[in-house]
Image (cartoon, rainbow, N blue to C red):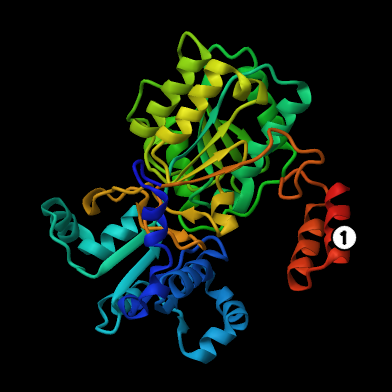
Amino acid sequence: MAPGLALDDVTAGQAAAYRDPEASRGVVLVLAAGNVASLGPNDALCKLFVEGKVVVLKSNPVNDYLVEHWERALKALLDEGVLRIVRGGAAAGAHLVAHSLIDEVHVTGSDKTHDAIVFGPGADGTRRKDAGVRLVTKAVTAELGNVSPVVIVPGAWSAKELNYQASHVASMLVNNAGFNCLTPRVLLTWRHWPQRAAFLHELECVLASIPTRRAYYPGAHERHASFLDAHPGAHRIGAADDDRLPWTVIRDLDAGRHDDVALNVEAFCGLLAETSLDTATVDQFVDAAVEYCNDVVWGSLAVTVLAHPRELRDELVGSRIEAALAALRYGSIGLNLWHAWSFAFGTTTWGAYPGHAVTDIQSGVGVVGNALMFDRPQKSIVTGPFRVVPAPPSFATATHGSAAMRRFVRFQLDPGPVSALRVVAAAAR
């Protein structure tokens, strides 16, 4: 929560839609993202149950094939008449945004999509944005993109720890073929970390063991090419063809070039860059990394910090890491856990750090998830152990990850000790 709030301040505004249902009435249009299958339903469920709205959910044409599955999963809400799911492209979206029965709009996508909705498309929209004149005056909430950083606090890591964290970062990158707003885009390292080169080598070795995937999202090849134009020396890993893109690592980005495309544009494919900060000590690196993430790297959606327990226990470095969690202006922070879990848990909030102006929306405004129904959350912080044995089945390197996750779905359908043990057994393999 924001500094200065007492417990009574936090609880007084909690579950507002249930305290005063009349005040929460209205119809919200949810414009679903085109990448992750769960985003549209997740946003709709949040608007329905946290905010008490009636929802029209429009699929993105990229994943129209999911609509029949959403309709099966959400049939009870469709039958009750509090949810409708529709298909259509930009014209359908514009019609719904302007419709007199729509009171609010929620969009998951890019800042360009948000600006086209709020100010209108093309040159006219740009002029309205520059003048601060909105074309759409309805309330608009948005979960948008981010150049997601991963801050690596230097330490003396064992070979197994190096491999684990390399697998951790690689799994973040390849998830959904890199087409996530929460995919890591910038690794921040300490220039004097003795294991910096070893970590990057291990990361590329892990990526080489993971087959490349179909680059299904529109414009992916063109975006990837634009990054290679700026960084022709980028390391391209794995097979590539007209259908697939290689995993791509840009090493040793000049940290002083604040206008670099890798720091300002979300790649939205399987690509990340690494840059190092030159400070005298590790605690100074932590402080410098916070400043760099807040003021240089574009966006405010999510960031991950990786730190060995020795550094967390260190009186000086540990205190700076604790201060960093408070000072980072991001809506979600992961400490030794990919920040994506803040979205996945659902009890936590997912959305940009509050305070963006509508004319500089960056990662958006408002939150989803938030099952505890707080009215003024600032950020969510999720934490985990530095290394888990065996590695989680969600890792891309997990041999039996698919079997474990299938059993996890069965456990959710029929929870109990037997189905729980089956999940553990599959994960332990």
Residue 286: x and y, percent?
Answer: 48, 22
Q: Residue furthest top?
A: 280
* Near-viewer residue (419 or 120): 419
The answer to whether residue 96 shows anywhere in this view is yes
Which residue carries the number 1 mark?
Answer: 422
- Residue at horizontal 38 percent and vertical 48 percent from the top: 6
Q: Is residue 169 left or right of residue 112?
A: right
Q: Residue furthest left?
A: 131
Q: Quadrant of residue 153?
A: top right
Query: Does 424 sit above or below residue 226?
Result: below
The answer to whether residue 243 shows anywhere in this view is no
Query: Does 415 sit above or below residue 387?
Result: below
> Around disc 1, counting alpha carbons within 10 Å, would you say few (fewer than 14), some (14 to 19), or many (20 or more)?
some
* Near-viewer residue (74 or 179): 74
Residue 164: x and y, percent?
Answer: 73, 33
Residue 168: x and y, percent?
Answer: 67, 38
* Near-viewer residue (313 or 41): 313
- Residue at horizontal 81 percent and vertical 38 percent from the top: 389
Q: Secondary structure at mark 1?
A: helix
Q: Amino acid at mark 1?
A: Arg
Query: Does 406 sit above or below residue 144?
Result: below
Q: Is residue 350 left or right of residue 399?
A: left
Q: Residue furthest front?
A: 8
Residue 405: x and y, percent?
Answer: 76, 59
Query: Does 305 sit above or below residue 75?
Result: above
